[in-house]
Every structure is written in structure tokens, then in C-alpha cells.
Amino acid sequence: MDKKVVYSGIQPSGSLTIGNYIGALSNFSELQEEYNCLYCIVDMHAITMPQEPKNLRKNTLDILALYLACGLDPEKSIIYIQSHVPEHAELGWVLNTIASMGQLQRMTQFKDKSSKSREVLAGILNYPVLMAADILLYQSAYVPVGEDQRQHIELTRDLAQKFNSRYSDTFTIPDMMTPKVGARIMSLQDPQYKMSKSDSDENAFILILDDENAIRRKIKRAVTDSEGVIRYSSEQSGLKNLIDIYSSFSKLSVEEIVEKYKDLGYGKFKEDLAEVVVEGLRPVKERFHSIRNDKEYLEKVYTEGAQKASALARKTLRKVYKKVGFIPR
């Protein structure tokens, strides 16, 4: 393949937020014009936390429909479901044999989750290795993720370099690819934390599929500060987050937004922001509902996607198996 490879995966663990849309989905359709892109629904990662099987199946198809609604073209990108390509788990096992316990226990998400649970499941410890396998299987050059995933990319790079050093050059060493604005959209109620659909306060996040009134209500209730002055400053983190959201949906620069609202106050700014978000999401939601109801089309996309992904994955896995000393079947 002449073009460099971009790999991205999203967990089907519930509805996605506008943070997912701004930081990932909205950029995907442009990337497929410049790169060879693989977009995966990582259902194997999702089961590291308990899932209701019927909900997992529904959420998986929801994510697939959202991929397509956001402009991904199955003729230009490979769109598939992780569990349909067993090479992910196979490479994950090989990489587990060169990953150290110390590395995995230092992962921030493992420390956070293990501190909140009396029983720590092995999947929580090992899933970063499976994530590394996801990326390395396809000789990915870039992974479009936010800053919160930097540690996982560094682990992936380390495992690739360790394998290449031990067995000779096998894997491409991937780099992060982050959008300039909105890479990390924060909670609307506590902007010190990333926006998350698992937040106990439903006013802290906006889902891509939220109805218009819910979007307006959540933005109206979003925290700002007592200054009443439109500035883009880390000292006004709530307002800064809202300006990032506005910029991402409107394509106006931060400077243009600050200038536009400098004398208008928070009320007018929030009112306009709500409409910008509502209008920005409307075509996505309309396409989503149309695509989601076409089960035959969705099945065609994920079946053909898995076939294409498997063909690429097998090439890498054959090299890996040969280098570690496995006898070909």
C-alpha cells in the first residue's frame, strides 16, 4: 500500500458523546481521502467490563451506523468488527509474552479501575496489549486519539520496538494523530475531567443522538464562572471548554469566537452554541437513523470489512509466527 495506514477503534459500550464526535468521528471522513484507513468497533475491549449481550450487539451496530453516518465510505476505508478478525487476539497473546507486569500495572486506567474494585479482572490489566495488537497488525503509521490515550500509544511503540529488536524489523512504529482543537472535550459540569457517557450526572455530557431539547438544556446548564467575560483561558476552564466545542462545530477560530461575543455575555453565547451543536449534529442523526434501519446493508459492510481486514492481518501474523518459531499449518 502506497499510502500510510491510519487505525482507529471505538468501544461499543453505549452511546457516544460529542467528545467522541469532535475528537474522532468528525475527522474520519477526511482521513480516508489521504490515508489507508481501518475503523474498528472494538467489541473485545468492551467485555473487559460486564456487558448485557443484547445491549452489546445493539451498541455494536449503533457504532457501525454512526461511522457510516459521519461519512465513512466502505469503498475507501475498511470498517469492521474486532471479534470478526481473530488475528487480533492471536497477536495479542504473542505481545503479552514480551509485555512486563510493571508496564501494565503502571497504566493510569488500570490504576484508576483497580483502586475502585475489590476484584481486578485480568482483562483490565491486559487490554492495553490487545490495543497494541489492534494497531500493529495493520502496520499502522498513525492512530487518531486524544491525549488521554498517549500512555497506550507509548506502550504500543515500546512493544513494537521490543519485538523488532528481538526478532528483526516486523512492525511499523506508530505515532499519535491529534486534532488541533477539541482533542479533549471536558465535562460540562466539572471541566477538570474528560466528558464521559459514564458520568453519573447526565448534564455533564451531550450524546451525539441526544434530542435537540436535551442539547439546549445541557448547554444552558453548563458551568462557566462568575467573571461574565468571554475569554479563552485555562483560568476559565468551563468557558474554555465551551469555546472549544463551538470552534469544532462552527469551524470559527477561537479568536473569532471571543471577538464575536466579547460584549454579549454568557447567555447569548450559550444560546448560539446550542444552535451550532444542534445544527451540526442534525444531518448525522438523520443519516444514522436511515442507515441503522437497513440491517442488510450493515451486515454487508461488516462482513466485507472483516474479509479485507483479515487479509491484511494474516500477512503480519504470518511474519510474527515465523519469527517466534511457530511451525506453519
Image (cartoon, rainbow, N blue to C red):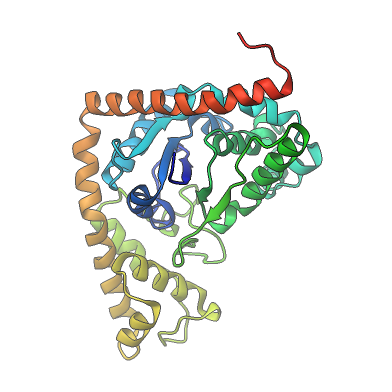
Q: Give the residue displayed 28% in from the left and 40% down from the top.
A: 73
Residue 12, above or below 218: above
Percent position (x, y) of residue 30? 34, 53
For residue 207, say whether it is visible: no
Q: Give the residue displayed 49% in from the left and 62% down from the top.
A: 186
Percent position (x, y) of residue 94? 69, 26
Q: Give the residue displayed 51% in from the left and 27% down from the top.
A: 313
**Viewer-proximal residue among 65 and 202:** 65
Percent position (x, y) of residue 183? 48, 61
**Viewer-proximal residue among 54 and 314:** 314
For residue 127, say whether it is visible: yes
Q: Quadrant of the C terminus?
A: top right
Q: Quadrant of the N terminus?
A: top left
Q: Give the residue displayed 74% in from the left and 31% down from the top.
A: 167
Report whether 277 appears left or right of 199: left
Extreme front residue here? 2
Residue 84, above or below 107: above
**Viewer-proximal residue among 97 and 108:** 97
To which quarter of the image does residue 134 belong?
Answer: top right
Extreme bottom residue here? 263
Residue 138, above or below 230: above
